[in-house]
Amino acid sequence: MTTDEHNKTLGILQLVYGGLHSLLLVLAVVFTIPVIYTLINEPGRSAPPFGFFLLAIGVGALVSLLFILPSLVAGYGLLKRKTWARKAGIVAAILMALNIPFGTALAAYSFWFLSGRGAQLYVDESARFARYALGDAPPPPISDWVENDRRGEREQVYAPPAQPPDWR
């Protein structure tokens, strides 16, 4: 696979991971609230504090969102080739590594790609020129357009458009 294909695959996998976990979070909240309501309204028992249960659900949902959001943000950034996507992907991979086995496998793939060939996709151009100016790196590649312009091959001569045929 090419670097672009790996990038696209990783972005889609990050979004699928985040979307699946978001769906599971919504289902957990939706199915937990009726259980709590049943516990509170059970006849013959003293009612446990409803506020405590809501607080526990809220804290659990917030912690889950802290693990889900980085993968969604990283997936979007990878697909759109944003300059910050590599850093977001690494942060998301660190958090995904805690979810054994699928999160760990996706984290390993993320680390492999974002620290290897994928790192070149997200190198900031200004940093590359700054390293060259300091003498730490070779000169950045010159695009074909600039090189051809230097040789004068891009010079165009004006040619008037062809006249349409006379149909009279």
Image (tube, helix red, strand yellow):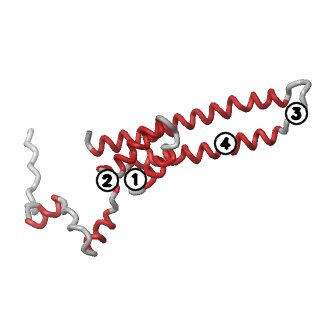
Q: Which residue is mark 2?
A: 121
Front one among 151 and 88? 88
- Secondary structure type for disc 2: helix
Q: Are marks 3 and 2 in contact (CB under 8 Å)?
A: no
Q: Is residue 16 left or right of residue 26?
A: left
Q: Amino acid at mark 4?
A: Gly
Q: Which mark is residue 102?
A: none
- Secondary structure type for disc 3: loop
Q: Quick one: label 1 or label 3, which is nearer the N terminus?
A: 3
Q: Are marks 2 and 1 in contact (CB under 8 Å)?
A: yes
Inter-mark Cα distance, 3 to 2:
58 Å
Instruction: From this view, report whether residue 41 is shown above or below residue 19.
Output: above
Q: Which residue is mark 3?
A: 47
- Label 3 neighbourhood size at 10 Å, few (<14), some (14-19), many (20+)? few
Q: Quick one: label 4 or label 1, which is nearer the N terminus?
A: 4
Inter-mark Cα distance, 3 to 4:
22 Å
Number of marks present in the image shown: 4
Q: Amino acid at mark 1?
A: Arg
Q: Which residue is mark 1?
A: 86
Front one among 113 and 5? 113
Q: Which residue is mark 4?
A: 60
| Image spot of residue 1 (x, y percent) | 26, 39
Of tags 2 and 4, which is closer to the observer?
A: 4
Q: Quick one: label 2 or label 1, which is nearer the N terminus?
A: 1
Q: Quick one: label 3 or label 2, which is nearer the N terminus?
A: 3
